[in-house]
Image (cartoon, grey):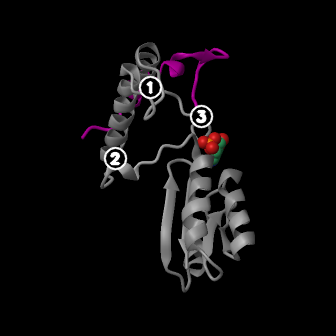
Amino acid sequence: MSALDVAKIQRDFPLLEREVNGKRVTYLDSASSSQKPLAVLDAMDHYYREYNANVHRGVYTIAEEATAAFEAARAKVAGFVNAAHPHEIVYVRNATEAINLVAYSWARANLREGDAIVLTHMEHHANVVPWHILAAERGVELRWIPITADYRLDLSNLAELLDGATVRSVKVVPGKIVNFVVA
Ligand SMILES: Cc1ncc(COP(=O)(O)O)c(C=O)c1O
């Protein structure tokens, strides 16, 4: 396989053709708002022009088309991430909603005093607040991975942080979040 062709990938993103202050845009805030490639812009345009309707609720043609497209996308995503079944793919609006969903459903049902959640000092507050609430409610302990002087995660004491623990879940949201739940 050839090396990553950055110029080719860049051409998929119209926004990256823009110039700001006389320079091509280099966009580094993807954790906040991801830029959309042409394939996504085209699909969204097609959707809004042709079959924008409520999914799973309407019995008219365009609602059924919207539902079919919605579920086809779920199956495609499942294949992409190698999920065993499309129903494992849950759509949410953003990372904050995803974390809260896990914290308020799985974590609240499964974690109790004696369990610990390992976070890092790099977390966005979207990945801190739900765990503080859980810690206060359930007596779950929060453990923290520190940052080195050159702003990297200091994993030198990871073994200590996980000492005596069984890792029950490792959660990774690309570009955003790393959590370990230990018991
Ligand atoms: C690093 C990081 N993590 C998490 C979030 C929260 O993501 P969302 O806006 O998808 O809830 C943001 C949003 O700016 C972020 O920049």
Q: Is residue 143 above or below residue 67?
A: below
Query: Which residue was labeled with disc 3?
Result: 33
- The numbered disc on residue 78 is 2
Q: Where is residue 53 in the image (x, y as percent from the top left)?
A: 47, 23
Residues shaded magenta: 1-28
Q: Is mark 3 on a helix, strand or loop?
A: loop
Q: Where is residue 49 in the image (x, y as percent from the top left)?
A: 44, 13
Report the image quarter containing ligand 1: top right
Query: Which residue was labeled with disc 1?
Result: 37
Residue type for callout 1: Pro
Residue ID at (56%, 50%)? 98
N-terminal of the pair, mark 3 or mark 2, is: 3
From the image, state whether disc 3 or disc 2 is nearer to you. 2
Q: Is mark 1 on a helix, strand or loop?
A: loop
Q: Which residue lies furthest to the left in this view?
A: 1
Q: In the depicted view, which residue is nearer to us: 39 or 57?
A: 57
Inspect the magenta stretch and tell me whether residue 9 lies in it. yes
Q: Does the residue labelled 3 lie within 8 Å of ligand 1?
A: yes
